[in-house]
């Protein structure tokens, strides 16, 4: 089975190289790994023995960030190495000051894994939620390096729990300890003979709760909102945006802030067409000389913005602002539910917003919990969206339930840190 896995990795690597000829993300994926081992050798000293945090992408980074930062506060002399698999994580957080070095993770071959572990010599490795790399896990195990999975979540449908999943179960066997989000994950791991499990919860609750106490100040957004009630739509995709366009037309007394998941020029132009009379955040910034450093320049043809226009819809054409936008909202819509799965609902819930999202949410325990509490609704069409919106529009308790849910669930970071702390002494 290892042979088939290795062949699969090789085919994936080849496919990405071909895609890099015409796909910008694939190009970053390939270019970021060029001369990667020379880069690692130049930034990690032979006696450093850092703590290694690996994140698949940006979402996992934000999930594991509370543990990283709490560890750094408690052990300020410890060096931290961070790796990302995806460009959407690395390119946004490559200058993160909480780590001593940040790299792309080399492709999971046996040779790469052994070389990486030999160069970095991590004191421990911490992976967040997903990503089970056979060769890296095995190399860490053979080197005697403790490997922890934090905020893990498992489902019966995963291959680990199938009769034909023996190879994948062996990968899990290399993990020193699992910190999981729910009781179902505990029981599933116990069922396959893995008892090194702690039900610690999800570290995202710690992250979003702390952020909601001290959000980024955004005076331009505050001026746009004024005294109007606001719906904040985060990480939206085209299917989400089509539904929201109809909702905005039906509720002219509300302001709408749309933060698309993709902000490349063709998509922003398409969103502008869906929302006639809308403005881009870059227009607000340009009008006041307050353009943010995270802005991605657009060449969409625009009329100059003046405050007298009083638009209803604001389109966010930059990255890095979304988590603070929810402070202005009364209701949130979370995108992705008409694709592979919804994005982060907890950022909105932490600010006391009830949330609405599409039908693909089954992989997200927090979405199920919020629905059960009456603080969220899943919708499949325009009529259901309008019904959910009108219900939350007049329900002050729904947002309070969302906020209390986040506050009650925080604390995973402390549990994890207490457990791994003995290795750092």
Image (spheres, grey):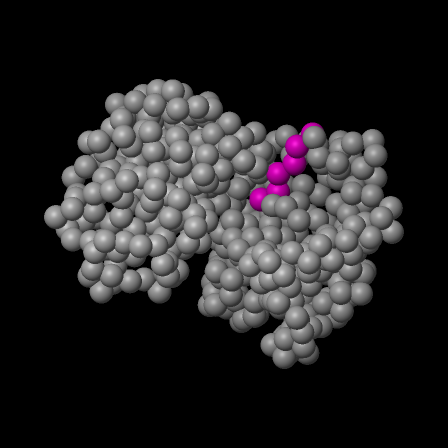
Q: Residue 196 lies in what quarter of the image? A: top right
Give the residue drawn at x 53%, y 57%.
Answer: 89
User: In the drawing, does residue 217 fall left or right of residue 241?
Assistant: left
Rendered view: 72 above or below 249: below
The rendered magenta stretch, by its main secondary structure, is classed as: loop
Give the residue drawn at x 27%, y 44%.
Answer: 278
Task: Work out which quarter of the rendered image holds the C terminus and state it.
Answer: bottom right
Rendered view: 56 above or below 291: above
Give the residue drawn at x 87%, y 51%.
Answer: 3
Q: Residue furthest front?
A: 301
Q: Residue 44 lies in what quarter of the image? A: bottom right
- On whether residue 289 falls in the magenta region, the answer is no
Residue 63 percent across, percent down from the top left: 51, 49
Give the magenta part as a residue range: 151-156
Foreground of the two, 5 or 364: 5
User: In the drawing, does residue 3 fall left or right of residue 236?
Assistant: right
Rendered view: 75 above or below 193: below
Residue 204 percent across, percent down from the top left: 48, 45
User: In the drawing, does residue 232 fall left or right of residue 64?
Assistant: left
- Residue 83 visible somewhere in the drawing: no
Q: Residue furthest left?
A: 308
């Amino acid at each position: 089975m290892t042979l088939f896995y290795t062949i699969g990795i090789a085919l994936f690597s080849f496919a990405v190289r071909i895609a890099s000829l015409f796909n910008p993300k694939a190009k970053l994926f390939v270019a970021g790994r060029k001369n990667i081992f020379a880069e690692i050798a130049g930034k990690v000293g032979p006696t450093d023995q850092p703590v290694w945090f690996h994140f698949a992408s940006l979402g996992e980074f934000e999930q594991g960030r509370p543990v990283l930062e709490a560890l750094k506060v408690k052990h300020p002399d410890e060096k931290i190495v961070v790796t990302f698999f995806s460009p959407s994580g690395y390119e946004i957080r490559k200058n993160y000051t909480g780590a001593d070095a940040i790299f792309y993770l080399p492709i999971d071959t046996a040779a790469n894994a052994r070389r990486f572990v030999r160069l970095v010599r991590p004191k421990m490795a911490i992976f967040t939620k997903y990503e089970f790399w056979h060769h890296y896990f095995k190399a860490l195990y053979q080197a005697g390096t403790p490997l922890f999975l934090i905020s893990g979540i498992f489902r019966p449908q995963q291959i680990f729990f199938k009769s034909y999943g023996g190879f994948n179960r062996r990968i899990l066997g290399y993990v020193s300890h699992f910190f999981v989000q729910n009781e179902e994950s505990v029981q599933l791991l116990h069922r396959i003979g893995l008892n090194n499990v702690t039900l610690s919860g999800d570290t995202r609750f710690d992250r979003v709760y702390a952020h909601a106490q001290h959000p980024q100040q955004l005076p331009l957004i505050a001026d746009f909102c004024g005294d109007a009630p606001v719906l904040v739509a985060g990480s939206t995709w085209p299917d989400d945006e089509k539904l929201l366009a109809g909702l905005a037309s039906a509720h002219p007394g509300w302001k709408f802030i749309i933060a698309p998941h993709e902000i490349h020029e063709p998509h922003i132009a398409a969103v502008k067409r869906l929302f006639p009379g809308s403005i881009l955040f870059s227009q607000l910034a340009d009008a006041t000389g307050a353009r943010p450093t995270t802005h991605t320049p657009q060449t969409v043809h625009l009329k100059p913005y003046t405050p007298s226009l009083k638009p209803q819809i604001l389109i966010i054409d930059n990255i890095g602002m979304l988590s603070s936008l929810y402070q202005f909202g009364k209701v949130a819509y979370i995108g992705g539910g008409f694709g592979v799965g919804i994005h982060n609902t907890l950022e909105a819930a932490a600010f006391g917003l009830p949330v609405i999202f599409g039908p693909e949410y089954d992989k997200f325990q927090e979405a199920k919990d919020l629905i059960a509490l009456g603080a969220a609704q899943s919708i499949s069409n325009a009529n259901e969206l309008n019904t959910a919106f009108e219900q939350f529009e007049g329900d002050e308790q729904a947002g309070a339930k969302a906020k209390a849910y986040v506050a009650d669930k925080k604390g995973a970071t402390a549990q994890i840190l207490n457990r791994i702390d003995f290795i750092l002494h």
